Image: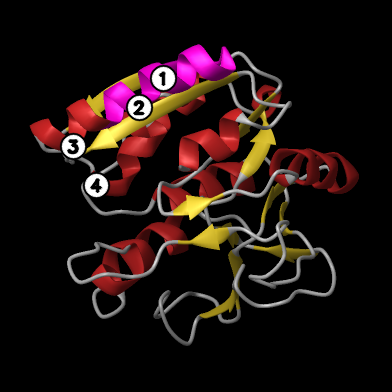
Amino acid sequence: KTLESICKQPETANIFVTLNSYTAEQYKQTMDAIKELRKQYGIKITTRRANNEKASNEKLSQLPKSKAKYIAFADDDVIYPADYLRRMIAGCNANNAMVSLHGGKLVEWPVRKYYGQSRQCLSWQRDLEEDTQVDVLGNVFTLFRREWFSTEEMKALYQNATAVSMDDIYLACLASQKGIRRVVLEHHYNTASPLCPRHKEKETGDHYVYDRYKNDDAAQVEYINEHLRR
């Protein structure tokens, strides 16, 4: 469903999918569905099967392969509205910045607790009245210009990543070092609107990064304090 919501958007050129920790049954089911999407929409979809060696950082692995003007992330627990890519590209160009609908401002420095008092979260599930500069964007919605990062820089993001899930932090720190702003775009959360992203219901057994690290974010704190340029 996530893939189809992206395939339907006229801005989509290619899709790179990382299937992380899929069982054999899940993998077959997904590949069958992807085959049908390729035929229906004529979109090139490149897949990679990962074994969770680097947790959520696995989503960084295929970045260097893209030759498109823009790169956008999508997570498989969200269905994206029909105007998603159009809005994100417009926001990227208007702000000359990496953009998302979710992110966080660091309200104390150095950071002491990233998933706590050190960060003000601007959630995509709460209204935001104006485009707002932040420190770290949530990669469930991030979009940026491909030209801002060299192929070697994007390769290094994955190669140097650890098994601690912080793909958003790795990307934000690199952007900060290159002087690239990060902006959460104005948005309004109304689940009745077809222009609002839809999130799957949370289930027992779901593995969300926040839940995993909210009481154990020492690695994130150390990395931000060492690598983020403010």
Amino acid at pointer 3 = Gln
Decide if residue 186 is on the left or right side of residue 230. Answer: right
Nearer-the-camera pick, 127 or 43: 43
Residue marked by disc 1: 36
Decide if residue 207 is on the left or right side of residue 155. Answer: left
Nearer-the-camera pick, 206 or 219: 206
* Quarter of the picture holding the N terminus: top left
Vertical side of 92 occupied by 159: above or below? above
Label located before the other in sequence (1 or 4): 1
Vertical side of 219 occupied by 146: above or below? above
Residue 110, given in percent of the width and then of the height, sits at 49, 75
Q: For the residue carrying disc 4, how many other residues have a C-alpha within 10 Å: few (<14), some (14-19), or many (20+)?
A: some
Q: Tag 1's secondary structure?
A: helix
Q: CA distance from mark 3 to mark 1?
A: 16 Å
Label located before the other in sequence (2 or 3): 3
Could you tell me which residue is drawn at 31 percent across and 47 percent down? Answer: 56
Q: CA distance from mark 1 to mark 4?
A: 28 Å
Q: CA distance from mark 1 to mark 2?
A: 5 Å
Q: For the residue carrying disc 3, how many other residues have a C-alpha within 10 Å: few (<14), some (14-19), or many (20+)?
A: few
Label located before the other in sequence (4 or 2): 2
Circles 1 and 2 in contact, beta carbons < 8 Å = yes
Q: For the residue carrying disc 2, how many other residues have a C-alpha within 10 Å: few (<14), some (14-19), or many (20+)?
A: some
Amino acid at pointer 2 = Ala
Amino acid at pointer 4 = Ala
Could you tell me which residue is drawn at 65 percent across and 77 percent down? Answer: 126
Nearer-the-camera pick, 61 or 114: 61
Vertical side of 125 occupied by 85: above or below? above
Residue marked by disc 2: 33
Residue marked by disc 3: 26
Q: Residue furthest right?
A: 94
* Residue bounds of the magenta highlight: 30-46
